Amino acid sequence: MKLGYTIVYVPDVAASLAFFGKAFGLATRFLHESGTYGELETGPTTLAFAAHELGAMNFEGGHVKASESARPLGMEVALVTADVPAAHAGALRAGARELAPPKKKPWGQEVSYVRAPDGTLIELCTPVEA
């Protein structure tokens, strides 16, 4: 078993892909012609976005929409970078909302948190040093 995808359900797949491209320089790998599913170039594990209407088809009881929640969901997308302050500033310029500015953790990792316009909670962090 291995982790293959993280799929975030969003109101506008193309807008989410554009935000991640503008904020972090992540290229779009794929956007379905329907506009309801897209993927970013993120390495071996794919970060993908699917439209809320696909979630409605997949989950009979519905799902919690991060885009409509006042508070971030209890999960995050963590992006690893050597320069957390620069990535944080880029996210804010692209339209993210700051939740926590860059801060050095006791174990030496630098971490910040932003919320994307689609509601996704994003951690920006340096690699964890073992």
Image (cartoon, rainbow, N blue to C red):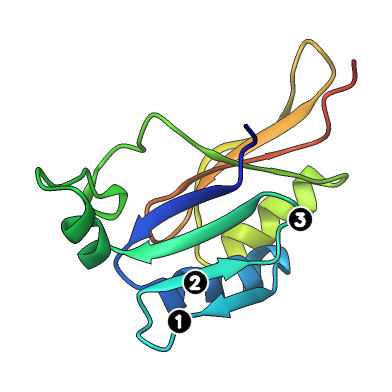
- What is the x, y in percent for residue 57? 18, 60
100 and 57: which is toward the camera? 57
Q: Residue at x 67, y 49 (%)?
A: 45
What residue occupies the far front of the structure in this picture?
A: 1
Q: Mark 1–mark 2 contact, CB under 8 Å?
A: yes
Q: Residue at x 45, y 78 (%)?
A: 14
Residue 110 vertical position relative to residue 122 in the rendered view, above or below: above
> Which picture quadrant has residue 100?
top right
- What is the x, y in percent for residue 67? 29, 55
Q: Is residue 128 left or right of residue 100?
A: right
Q: Is residue 113 left or right of residue 12?
A: right
Q: Secondary structure at mark 3?
A: loop
What is the three-letter code of the residue carrying label 1? Answer: His
Residue 14 vertical position relative to residue 84 in the rendered view, above or below: below
Query: Mark 1 vs mark 2: which is more N-terminal?
Result: 1
Q: CA distance from mark 3 to mark 1?
A: 19 Å
What residue occupies the far top of the structure in this picture?
A: 106
- Return the residue at label 2: 38
19 and 28: which is toward the camera? 28
Q: Which mark is residue 43?
A: 3
What is the three-letter code of the residue carrying label 3? Answer: Gly
Query: Mark 2 vs mark 3: which is more N-terminal?
Result: 2
- Return the residue at label 1: 32
